[in-house]
Structures are given as C-alpha cells and as structure tokens.
Amino acid sequence: MNMPDMQGVLCDVLEQRKVTTLYQPIVDLRAGTMYGYEALSRGPSDSSLHSPLAMLRAADHFGLQARIEQLCVETAVRGFVARRLAGKLFVNIRPARLFDPFFKPEKLAGFLNSAGLSPRRLVLEITESDPVVEYTAMADLVGSLRDVGIEMAMDDLGEGFSSLRLWSELKPSYVKIDKHFISGLNQDPVKLQFVRSLQQIAEKSQSHIVAEGIEMVSELAMVKDLGIAFGQGYLLGRPALMPPAVPSAEAAQCLARSAISVFPRAGAVRTQRTAHRLLIEAPSVDISTASEQVLEILQENEGLHAVAVVKDGIPAGMISRPLLLDQFTRHFSRELYGRKSCSLFMDKTPLVVDIGTLVSELAELVVRKGKQDFSDGFIITENGRYRGLGSGYDLMREITEMQVVAARYASPLTLLPGNVPIHEHTDRLLAAGVDFVAAYFDLDHFKPYNDVYGYRKGDEMIQLLARIITEHCDANLDFVGHIGGDDFIVLFQSQDWEWRCRQIMRQFDSSRLALFLPEHVAQGGYESEDRRGRMVFHAPVMLSIGAVPVRQGYFQQHLEVERAASQAKKMAKKSEGNSLFIERRCHLDNTEEPGEEDWAPARLAEVSFRDF
C-alpha cells in the first residue's frame, strides 16, 4: 500500500471509528480470580493497519498519533462497560500522550464517568516505545491522575529504555515484567533471580508485579510460588472480543495446588555454559592479506593473542602472535615475507568450534588437540562463519569458576544439588506448610565394592543411582539432592512417591548388574581381604530407602527432617536386600529411633542376587 492510500485508510479509521478491542484476562494469583483485563486494540481486519504496531506507525508518520490513541482508549472503555466485565481495565498509552488535552486528569475522569466506568477502575499502562525525558513533569502528571483515582502501570519492564528509573520516579501501582523473563523461568536460574529481585523491589515500593506471557503450568507455578500478585498469558486466558470470566481450568487447578516449585539449579545451568561466554570480538584477515598487514594488526592490538585467517568469511587458519612476531624479528624477514600472503605463517588446522559448543566439550577438544592449541586459543564460528576468537586462558578460568561453584552448591560427581541447596529447599517446604516426604537413599555394602572394583567403578555406581533417581522424579515437584558419597535425599511432593521409590529400587536392582563381573553375579557376591588379611565374603551392593512423611507442624527446620530421614534409612538397612522403610508414626521424636513395630508393609519383595 502506498503512502496516500495508507493515509486514506487511516483517516477512514478515525472517521468511522474502525478500531476493535480484544480483552485479555489478568488474574489474581492468590485468589485465583479475575482481577481485570488488558485492552488490545486492532485496526480494520481487512487492511494493512490491522496490527496495532502498523496502525501506530502510520499514525506517527501522518501526525495523527494523538487522535488514534485517544480513539483506542475510548473504544476500549466503552467496550469494557458494554460487556459488563469485572475488575480493572488496563489500557496502553505512550508516555507522550499523557500530556495531551484528553488525558488531563479532570477531562479523562469526566469521560470515564460519562461512559459508566469509575476512574478507580482504569489503569493506564505506560509503554516503553519512546524514551522519557521529562521525569519530573511526568511524575507530577501521574500524581494528578492518581488524585482522581486513575492508577498507573509500567509495561514490559526490562525491554525498553530506562525501566528502573521510570519505576523509581513514577511509583506505579503495577509493574509488568516482560514475557522474556517469564518464558522458561522454571528452568533458568538467571531469570529466576531477576524476577525475584523485581518482586523484592515491588514489595519495598508498594507496587504489584504482573507477570506477562505465562504459557506453561510450570511457569505459572513458579510465578505463584515467588509471591507475585498477578499474572497474564495464554494459559490464564487468551485475548478475545468476549473474554472468559474465570481462569482456564488448567490454570485454576495449578493455582489451587499447595505444592511449591523446585527452583532451577544454578550448578546445572553453569555446566551448560557455551563458547559464547569466551567470545573475543577480534578482527580477521582474508587469506590473500599480506603478512606485514597482519603484523600491523597485532602491533596495534597488544591484547590480541592471534589473528584468524578467513576465505569468504569461513575460517581457513590462524596466525599465532608469538610465532609471527618472532618471525619478523629475524634479519630480512620483512623484506622476504612482508608482502607475501599471510597463509605462509598460519596454522592450517586450528581448533574451530561453534559458538554454541558447551564449555565442558570445548575443554575436552583442547586437551585432545594438545598444548599448542591451549596457548594459541581457538576460532569461534556461528553458522559456519567466523565470529571471533577464544583464549585458552579464558577457558581455564571459566572451567575453574564452574568447578568452584559446583563444589559448593552441587556434587562434582553427579552435578546434583549439594547440602546448601538441600537445606534451603527443605526450609522453603517447611515455611510454606506443604506436606512432603523426605526419602533418604543409601547403598548397602558399598565400601567392599569400592575396595574390590576400585573407585572408578564406585563412581559409576553412584552416577547410575543418581541417574535412576532423577529419571523417576518429577522435576517440577521433587527435589533430588546428593548429600555426598553414596547418600542421596529426595524431597517428594509427588503424591505417588511410594510407587516412584519402588520403581527406583527395581531399576537399580537390574541396572547395577552391568557393574559386576559375571562370576560375582553367579556366586551372589565376592571375596576380599579384611584388615587382618582374612578372606571375607561380601554381599553385592543393595539399595536402602528410608522415607519420612512430613506434615505441617512436625518439624521446625531442615536439620530435624534430615535427622528423621537418616533414622528411617538406618531401619531400612537392617533388612537384607533392597528395602524401603516408611516411618508411619504421626510424630517422630528425633531423639528416638524407630522400632521393629514401625516397619511399613512397603518393602520390595526380596530377590536373591543369584536370581539375576
């Protein structure tokens, strides 16, 4: 559509008021009810101005932005009243529009009253499409609007120009977090920390957070668990001409659930760091470039350890800084080689990795390639084309940082959360008053196995158990932690936790056989010397599980829960073979060990090792 035609369509939209409003629910996450609706304006469905962005861009071009935005607000208000929708109406406006005559507090309040909507039910969402310059004037105007009952909201926090300052200056009643930070929130500890920080700021500033873009139950559960007041997204309700009066059944079920979410593990994501973190934006040279030009690049960039050589944007080699500088310090080198192709001095087989390569995989590649590649570094590509360089020393620093983090917060062997996260999650469960089950997993006869088969095989046995436990737990409900050695703990919120424990025992019972010699399987164990030099027959490795159902008020802190689970585990170990002991008593005195009468009828049927 050419510009005159577009102007004609836009004028027709204004004259005929051809704007349609869809309404998307905003849900009170604590009450599980509708709090209000956001108005989403659309142009004529049969024109290129149907998209709100296209309509606003055209309005900007022809100087009609004030009239278009006023029309959108008027249409949204009248449609909201006509549909008798409950709660508050959120409408989007750009910051500059607040200074238009229509939005003067008295005039806007007068329009609302004449349309049948109390000013106290209107929330103006300030979008961040344009930067705010006059903060003081804007704050004064917002204060005047607030005086007549109209509230303010900030839209898409984290996406625009100066979100945090605008928040501080305007003190809005609502702050909407951009959907980027909500999408995958349950899997990304960085997003989680960001949203938690915003929630803390909101609590201090007496603002309410609205989480946008909630599409998954797991995201909704995490947002609710963080104490965020309001939510919006397709899971809660899609935009519609006549929107629903209640949240979707799936969302309502999630909001009614008392379980808390399992926070994503920082250690796990840190192990997923990629070569992108090591990227050095460094110049490259074409393969036809003269050697003396490469020398000049290195002399001008003292921190550059190498120069990549490319052909049509694809890496062809790499020139090491020490190698080239050493070459050109020799007599007559510049005269002999200065004007010749730099390919004479390049490594034709450098290490080349994609920008998405995991740091752990990259480290293995560097070790495999040898010492030279560590000092020279490597080339980083994206979609096969040169993107930059990576340094061996940066890689070493990254690996070291990952190991330090893992050692404190996760088991280096299994990468499962260690004692600090275990304690934190247990205390979260207790504070929330949620019913859960603490299950302690321990391997029987593990030390003799280590002595006979060696620590490498022992590590494989521990990793096998970790993998089986993790596979049989719900990642959104059940927290799996590695206490240390062959000891694990699972904090179950899954209702079928007992069945999961049985499945773990069954799979471990069969999978462990691959870690024994055939003759040891056949004879049901193995012999080894004890400390006195005598041959002693040892039973094979078995799995014991001690489970303690935790009800509200039973325990006050994580130490009490872990002590009770440890006692239950000791009872499980009193039985030969794989066993599950469940503490059935209503209240457990942590100083008292369970007796034989406390055995639950939940033990797995014992199977002889020879039967396999």
Image: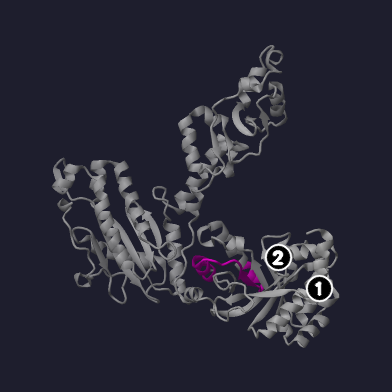
Residue drawn at 67 percent across, 64 percent down: 157
Labelled disc at residue 593: none
Tag 2 secondary structure? loop
Q: Nearer the viewer, residue 208 or 119?
A: 119
Classed neighbour count for the residue bearing mark 2: other residues with Cα under 10 Å, few (<14), some (14–19), many (≥20):
some
Q: Nearer the viewer, residue 50 or 214?
A: 50
Tag 1 secondary structure? helix
Labelled pair 2, 1 in contact (Cβ < 8 Å): no
Point out residue 14 in the picture as x, y percentages from the top left corner: 81, 73
Point out residue 359 in the picture as x, y percentages from the top left corner: 51, 42
Dot 1 amino acid type: Leu
Point out residue 480 in the picture as x, y percentages from the top left corner: 39, 59
Dot 2 amino acid type: Ser
Magenta-span inclusion, residue 50 = no
Magenta-span inclusion, residue 223 = yes
Q: Nearer the viewer, residue 45 or 514?
A: 45
Residue drawn at 38 percent across, 55 percent down: 482
Residue 132 appears anywhere in the view: no
The correct choice, above or below, for 525 with respect to 71 in the image is above
The correct choice, above or below, for 26 with respect to 311 in the image is below
Q: Nearer the viewer, residue 119 or 6?
A: 6
Position of 323 compared to 253: left or right?
Answer: right
Of pointers 2 and 1, the one earlier in the residue sequence: 1
Residue drawn at 69 percent across, 67 percent down: 155
Position of 465 compared to 210: left or right?
Answer: left
Mark 2 sits on what residue?
51
Residue 258 appears anywhere in the view: yes
Residue range (magenta) = 200-225
Mark 1 sits on what residue?
14
The quadrant in which residue 8 appears is: bottom right
